[in-house]
Image (cartoon, rainbow, N blue to C red):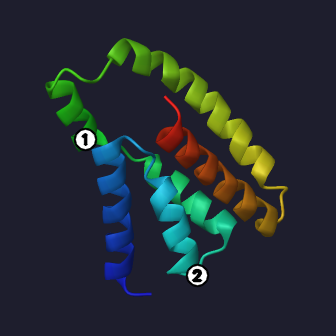
Amino acid sequence: MPVLTYILIGFAGGFVGGGLGLGGGAVMVPLLVMVAGLTQHQAQGTVVGLLTVPVFFAAAWRYYAAGNLKLDITGFMIIGFIVGSFLGAHLVQHLPAAVLKKIFGVALILIGIKIVFFK
């Protein structure tokens, strides 16, 4: 797979993450599976690896500069995020790829329905 493909997938995730506050993984995981041919587990692991680097620093700084980043709330959320991400990553290692892919897809659909139809 050409390096440019991976750069464009990263760009898409960063654009959606920085522009909408939506996790870039919602875009990058499906693209890594459909375009790059990774398994669901590999795609999710790759995106998690990407997010361990402060890739969203520029977007966070822009929100902070505009007064739209609540550092006090963010700090508490980080605590829950660390614990939840560890437990979630541990649990999915035991799921078959087909089941994991369906769970991922259903989660995206439910989030979309909630955003579009409910306040």
Provide the residue designation for mark 1: 59
Visible in this render: residue 55? no
Query: Does 30 sit above or below residue 48?
Result: below
Outermost residue on the bottom side: it is 1
> Which residue is depicted at the point 52% across and 40% down?
117
Outermost residue on the left side: it is 65
Side of 107 where 117 appears, left or right: left
Q: Nearer the viewer, residue 21 or 81?
A: 21
Q: Percent x, y for residue 60?
A: 27, 35
The amino acid beneath tag 2 is Gly
Q: Percent x, y for residue 18?
A: 30, 46
- Element type at marker 2? loop
The amino acid beneath tag 1 is Ala
- Element type at marker 1? helix
Give the mark count.
2
Q: Percent x, y for residue 78?
A: 50, 25
- Distance from the alpha carbon under mark 2 to that under mark 1: 29 Å
Q: Quadrant of residue 42?
A: bottom right
